[in-house]
Image (cartoon, rainbow, N blue to C red):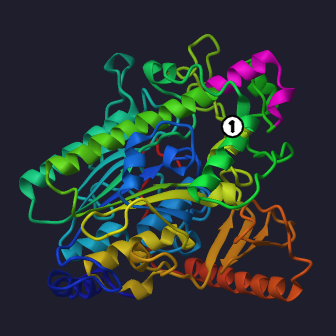
Amino acid sequence: MLSRREFGQIMGAATTAALTGAAPGSAAPTKRPNFLLLLADDMGFSDAGCFGGEIETPNLDRLASQGLRFTQMYSTSRCGPSRSCLMTGNYAQQTSADIMTPGNVPDSVRFTPEFLKPLGYRSYHSGKWHLRFTTGAGGVGFDHSYTLLDEDRYFTPRSLMLDGVKLPQPKPEDHYYTTTAIADYAVKFLQEHARDHAADPFFLFFAPHSPHFPLQAPAEDIEKYKDKFAEGWDTAREVKLARMKRMGLVNCELAPLEPNMWTTWNTPDAELFAKIGPGEISRALPWSSLNAEQKALQRTKMAIHAAMITRMDLEIGKVLAQLKAMDAERDTVVIFLSDNGASSEQLIRGDGHDASSPLGSASSFLGLGPGWASNSNAPFRLHKSWLNEGGISSPMIVRWPAGIADRNKLRHDPCHFVDVLPTFVDLAGGGAQGRLSGRSLAPAFRKDGAAPHDFIYFNHNDNRALRIGNHKLLATGKTGEWELYDMAKDRSEQHNIAAANPAMLRSMAERWQQLDEGYRVKREGAAPTKKIRMPAGSQV
């Protein structure tokens, strides 16, 4: 096991290579690039306009038109484990992040700032954290961090920190909104960097909470969408699929709604309906089966969801404008992702739902629900927490003017969040990537199909999956049997080919078991472990 000093020496030894030549496996220029990682929260694969969605996302669309869209990027299907994969380059099981309860983080685990600091980088974080270690004093190497630890409130969050120091709770009269504040701090960090550290490259992790539940947005943003979505999710999904096929994003069928699949930890139906009213539903039912009151509430919920994403896009534009103002646009690798698929969860948390308050306000605690979540994840099956494509497929946009020649192109390489850190280290000219489970995607920046994986592994919430080539092994729940799908033509997972391919099924199942046991042994046998310091009010 490497000490931090030994690790720093290994990484630092690569600095000369980073300054004198292109990064390994990449087409990078000699100047080390900056990195801007944009991470949405519970945003569906096809919410953004550039991924076929009906929500206005002009800044994301512009990034896509100036760079690449990856069509097969995978998350873990849950906020915390996905963030761990991004920050460590290892699967969540290897870092004790596969369950949402406290555990041991092996001492050998290193985080993105710790990889980049020996290479001369300064690192900044602004936004949601949702990991079992802190970003401030005694944290994992960020030079500055504006940290959101309260996932239940957008207007008056109770747990905010700046560089490890707790901040006062915003008051209603402050007109605070988390997405805007997160962008403002990101801009401040970049401005300070341009003023005091212009000679150094930087890494900025910009992580808005949006559009994670509760559905809360500024009234003027909701107003923009008040007359949209009246056609309902069935028609919206069909129209979206046709648009996505024309864009070359998918070539599969539309997965049907599955009213018998829902998250068992939801607020019980009786309580949900009593607090929200007769317009609420908790299953993915056909739109035509809803009454007028149900349709009215459901399309309002989608309007709020859309407003949250459009506001996030506007705030992303603010950060991108700062890059341009500091003459860093050309040399910055921008990557946009979502931590998992849209959520079907309906949880009344925080301050509870006040039915007399305007929907989307600080006193309103709605969840998007499975109907519109199915639209956000279309054309794929299911939602956040499942390992079906709707839960794990993330939109991915990459723009890097100095290093990527292609514009407005697609990449179909299957890849995973564990690949993001190795890509950064590769492009920065660093070593020690052999210690990571992910691999650099830099070759795919030049050519589609140039970054193949031997396998991509999944295990979350009693769901299991493995992707090898074009085939995906899948089992749902503790007792679910293994299924097998051909992702080349059936990403909506409608045609189980397990019975016709018993040898492949057996081989892939054995491989999954070997990987799972190996990753869990590494986690459970690790000693010593990182000391985890969780601030008051944080959630895991």
Name the image quarter holding residue 407.
bottom left
Q: Secondary structure at mark 1?
A: helix
What residue did someone put label 1 on?
Answer: 236
Q: Residue at x 63, y 44 (%)?
A: 376
User: Image point 54% across, 73% down: which residue?
Assistant: 413
Give the magenta-colored segment's residue range.
285-300
* Residue 352, x across and y down, in percent: 61, 24
Q: Position of residue 47 (x, y in %)?
A: 56, 44
Say left or right for 365 vs 28.
Answer: right
Query: Is 113 on the left or on the right of 15, as rendered?
Result: right
- Which sits in the foreground, 241 or 362? 241
Can residue 341 be seen? Answer: no
In the image, farthest residue toward the right = 499
* Visible residue check, residue 85: yes
Determine which quarter of the picture holds residue 250.
Answer: bottom right
Quadrant in the picture for residue 517: bottom right
Query: Does 27 appear in magenta?
Result: no
**Residue type of the residue flagged with mark 1:** Ala
**Residue 61 coordinates in the image, percent (x, y):** 42, 47
User: Who is closer to the viewer here, 467 or 359?
Assistant: 467
For the image, the number of numbered tags is: 1
Q: Main secondary structure of the magenta part?
A: helix
Is 164 above or below relative to 356?
below
x then y, percent, for residue 82:
53, 61
Residue furthest top in the image: 356
Disc 1 packing (10 Å; few <14; some 14–19; many ≥20): some
**Which quadrant would the N terminus be assigned to in this image?**
bottom left
